[in-house]
Image (cartoon, coloured by chain):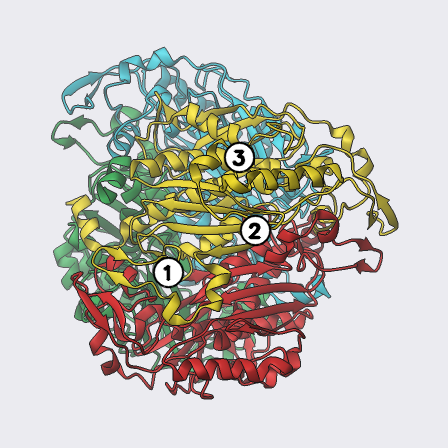
Chain colours: A yellow, B red, C green, D cyan
Amino acid sequence: MNTFGRRLTLTTFGESHGKAIGCILDGVPAGLTIDEAFIQAELDRRKPGKSKLETARKEDDKVEILSGVFEGVSTGTPISMIIFNTNQKSRDYDNVKDLFRPGHADFTYFHKYGLRDYRGGGRSSARETAARVAGGAIAKLMLKEIGIEIQSGLCEVDGIRAETIDFNHAKRSKLYALDPSKERAQEEAILAAKEAHNSVGGVVLTTATGVPVGLGEPLYYKLDAILADAMMGINAAKAVEIGDGVASTHLKGSQNNDAITPEGFKSNHAGGTLGGISNGDTLIVKTHFKPTPSIFQEQETVTTTNQPITCNLKGRHDPCVAIRGAVVTEAMMALVLADMTLLNMGRKMEHLTSLYN
Amino acid sequence: MNTFGRRLTLTTFGESHGKAIGCILDGVPAGLTIDEAFIQAELDRRKPGKSKLETARKEDDKVEILSGVFEGVSTGTPISMIIFNTNQKSRDYDNVKDLFRPGHADFTYFHKYGLRDYRGGGRSSARETAARVAGGAIAKLMLKEIGIEIQSGLCEVDGIRAETIDFNHAKRSKLYALDPSKERAQEEAILAAKEAHNSVGGVVLTTATGVPVGLGEPLYYKLDAILADAMMGINAAKAVEIGDGVASTHLKGSQNNDAITPEGFKSNHAGGTLGGISNGDTLIVKTHFKPTPSIFQEQETVTTTNQPITCNLKGRHDPCVAIRGAVVTEAMMALVLADMTLLNMGRKMEHLTSLYN
Amino acid sequence: MNTFGRRLTLTTFGESHGKAIGCILDGVPAGLTIDEAFIQAELDRRKPGKSKLETARKEDDKVEILSGVFEGVSTGTPISMIIFNTNQKSRDYDNVKDLFRPGHADFTYFHKYGLRDYRGGGRSSARETAARVAGGAIAKLMLKEIGIEIQSGLCEVDGIRAETIDFNHAKRSKLYALDPSKERAQEEAILAAKEAHNSVGGVVLTTATGVPVGLGEPLYYKLDAILADAMMGINAAKAVEIGDGVASTHLKGSQNNDAITPEGFKSNHAGGTLGGISNGDTLIVKTHFKPTPSIFQEQETVTTTNQPITCNLKGRHDPCVAIRGAVVTEAMMALVLADMTLLNMGRKMEHLTSLYN
Amino acid sequence: MNTFGRRLTLTTFGESHGKAIGCILDGVPAGLTIDEAFIQAELDRRKPGKSKLETARKEDDKVEILSGVFEGVSTGTPISMIIFNTNQKSRDYDNVKDLFRPGHADFTYFHKYGLRDYRGGGRSSARETAARVAGGAIAKLMLKEIGIEIQSGLCEVDGIRAETIDFNHAKRSKLYALDPSKERAQEEAILAAKEAHNSVGGVVLTTATGVPVGLGEPLYYKLDAILADAMMGINAAKAVEIGDGVASTHLKGSQNNDAITPEGFKSNHAGGTLGGISNGDTLIVKTHFKPTPSIFQEQETVTTTNQPITCNLKGRHDPCVAIRGAVVTEAMMALVLADMTLLNMGRKMEHLTSLYN
């Protein structure tokens, strides 16, 4: 239940304010050069406290590989990675110990399990996504070997929508903004919300290029369905679209179908999948993040004994979780695609016989 | 790869124009009264040819239980169900044998597997969803025993949106329309598209009431993530929303958080989940279906040897797949919830000890 | 829970006296020629009633493929097979309806599930193994393409042990006897037990030749461990040995280690695995079957309300289940090896890159 | 592939001479008091260097819990445990870097993955079993709450067989000997082999009392089959017996069937399972361990480039792996049973409805 994937599996552990978080990535083929600096760089893209747009919690997020790598290369055995927590302020959470923060998982964890680690949301904290990014980084190294590249950025913040898509700009942008002309307005919306002790939502666009035809295992491990699972499972995600997504609903079949030519598809309304299998075109996924539930306004809630109480949060929080969420969507897409490339190896008898004969 | 679920698993088989389709539902607890008439009634809601809004293919979709039920009651062993195909017209597909229909899985199946059963889309045909509905019907019988009820209907057709939600109306409506005042316009849009040899998209709203708090297994088998997987995996689905979904992105945190009172949540923007676990409120999912790719206009495509060719489809098709898709969303939600209720049984030591001591 | 394997999965359904038994085999690569006559021949080797050494129940065990095969070739979609029950005599079981037959699963099924299909043991009947043989036959077709051959035979009956191993003889022998010089004594032991309304045990030797080095996924999907699972899960199996097995316990390390030369291993005490991975030598497994629990002597037991009662069985039973069990061990070994060959495809980055670049 | 179990899963990582070994145990119900001293005590029973009968490698095997426990109690989230390696002497392995030690996994790992961590066997080292013992200790804490107790001991060493079974004696014995009257001879056999630079095999008896009726999920997750998987997967195991096992093959049905009385079974040839489901009687499993492959005699082998070479091992090794293997069998049995108790919770509708209504 804490494992993602089938052939390449990521199992994560850890709580926001425990000793450490980490993961075991199992199924990486032997012989992959493990670039630790790249893994750390990926974690740095996600780590908190890089700008005013993010939580003030400072975590170095230094990752350490404990197993599965020998002389710089993967051995085919499970790769375990650990990130120690260093900047916990558990006391910040004393005042939420006995109540449920609105919009958070406090209510459901407490009622499901009968108890909860209330410090920083415990297991439900977005901090756990660092382990996903570590695992996703190795998945990216795998994918790079076969020419797949994943990119992401914010295409919408607080309703302000990108009109042009520039992934190179997003890489340099504090808020991973895809449209340079909208970046300033988006940033201001975030800061305004922050000042008002409030928060805003955002939409992340994530794409993969170089995807071979054939990834995805119908009918119950389809590429698009598992991407939906992967993205919806990220903290604060509330909607996932593939290709034109919601907009395709308003088209006629004659407009939405992508015509095929000997050179490839003439359009990409489908977003790179047909029948749950990659069609070789760019994979396009949009993930919608709700506004951060942690706001610093008075909120109505109940205690763990169901008494009404007013909730006034302290602590350090992102005013727009979509920003750092973008890095997480890349990790999840990388994990999905790496898993699918391995599963797809057994699709034809000719591959089996060529490998063994 | 053709199995859905973990503790309650549905494995399906069968092609559109093969001998039969069917499924094995494994994990149903012993002692459930299996109401065969109800299962058949569910299949009848999905079966084709009920009105002009649907494909003209007539299939009785008579389901037969082969195992797992003894004297009318589930025994705890796998329940197998079979539906024979009776109204195949394979010849309709002779002309598509060597080309790829735009918007269909023809292209990806052929390139993935190196060959394909081209008759009616083979395995990728929406016909397979009959097996899901059969399995989902038994899941519904399970859920009924614990007070969970699932409903659905169309909240949008070709951009025409429901403003009121009336599930009782949807039950009687030919197009499962949720808003009686929009039904006629929606129907006309479908018929107009059909007459123009075209097709339209639609959006299905699916809800569950009576859901106990605690369903969903974080972090990688979350309720919302698995619902997203389940819905996105249905043929023609392109987007999934939980609760306010896309709209929540435009709210501030203070607007989107659902305040909690001793009597329950004051609003339900979340759509019944927090942290991937059900919160006891109504579960709300929206699934967006693209317009049917099968249209009767000339389309540009290529042959299996990548030569340009014009595609002119024959055959019988739904002008709006969202209609029958609604029934499938219910089945998938039922399968997810029944699976989750079983998984959730082991969440507390006190349940384990009370069961065994 | 009714599914075996990970990448190639066999899911079975059906009860001894229900309408049908069958299976879904999922994960067969596309492009395998499906030789239906071979599948039927395998079922014929297992089917009951071929000689006085077996139960008198006559079942044709005609298998029908319902899906996953198009124009004689696998398509990569699930292959479903069905075998209708034709020779049930449910009345034979009226007298055991309310009691538990010693040595059978009646007691445990009833107490686990609270009810049971008592006719012929229901799901726990060895009849279900026909579905395994059907699935195993297709696995054998896969393995044949890469040069793996599986054979079996009885190396012991009622304590009478084979001293020579002749698989060709076993193929022609009514009791699949491996040692022609012991066959008569073994046959007489079975017939003597039958006449005395009793039963005998036996040991099956199963081997695979042509196994490539590298099959088996350490540490929790090892080849030897999964073979142990596969064999112990066959009805009436009580012990499984790999290679020298029990005998290796009595050797010194210097005797038991297989020396390695450039031409291969000098001995095969290991039985073809090292560290849970195939080493290229012949795979050797022994499965020990207890005497058939169905005997026609008076036995002490209790009713379903826990009252003492004397049990006098009627019906038709094998006096030595190991005979037909041999065919099932082959099927299980084939399923394990075919699964392992698929899993093993992703072990090295160089295979991944060569497949996709 | 490095995960064991379905509902309660143990995922392990780590190599003999890497930084650390460890595990993630997922699926422990919330509310279990985690007795860290007990976990450490279990590890101490397995740790090396306690007597002359064991390897001289000294490892404290101090276990640290990183997650999943809050205020001394399990929270329902994954429990991660880590054990740092402190006494590696990697230089001991420089001389085996380029050759394959007979009887070891060197040959198969190298050929499967194309490279290997040669230090101490890397991942294939028995050192990994410390992680199993840590996970098994928590499984034992779960089982204790429902009255299940697991015990083990050596019933045979180098062919010297126990005639009486005394688990209390085994607990105090350096070699976990079950028969006090055979202990001395068994010990001397081990020491004699050690002095001769050789090794001996042994057989471990593992039992569970207090097992409720009903554990085991037919047909492909049977209790006995999964125990066989669990035990055969332990390093150096070559055979597994349930109940009378091999001996049952020599009995007649009338002798082997366990008669049933209102007070229970009159005998326990079956070893506590019928049809793969626990019958409430003592669970009895025997695991046969081959002699340690690491011996200090000259052995014939080949290099990684397939040249003949003489192998002379250095390093520190157990002359009889069955001793410490006994502790591992307990851990594996605990993991199997804890998993099965959770899976079994959903077997009847009445349990489902009572939990939710």
Q: Tell me the quarter of the picture where residue A165 sits.
A: top left
Quadrant where the C terminus of chain B lies? Answer: bottom right
Residue D313 in the image: above or below residue B92: above
Q: Secondary structure at mark 3?
A: helix
Question: The residue marked by circle 2 belongs to what chain?
Answer: A
- The disc label shown at residue D46, or none: none
Please tell me whether mark 2 sits on a helix, a strand or a loop. Answer: strand
Q: Is residue D338 visible?
A: yes
Q: Position of residue B324 (x, y in %)?
A: 48, 77
Q: With respect to residue D152, does D250 lie above or below?
A: below
Give the Cα separation between the discs numbered 3 and 1.
28 Å
The chain letter for the residue carrying disc 1 is: A
Q: What is the C-alpha distance between the residues marked 2 and 1?
A: 26 Å
Q: Chain of mark 3?
A: A
Residue at (63%, 49%) from the top-left corner?
Answer: A290
List the residue tagged with mark 1.
A218
Q: Position of residue D312 (x, y in %)?
A: 26, 14
Residue at x 43%, y 72% (from the top left corner): B129
Work out whether disc 2 and disc 3 sit on a shared chain.
yes
Q: Is residue D295 above or below residue C293?
A: above
Q: CA distance from mark 2 to mark 3?
A: 21 Å
Q: Which residue is mark 3?
A: A131
Badge 2 amino acid: His
Mark 1 nearby-residue class (10 Å; few <14, some 14–19, many ≥20) = many
Say which amino acid is labelled 3. Ala
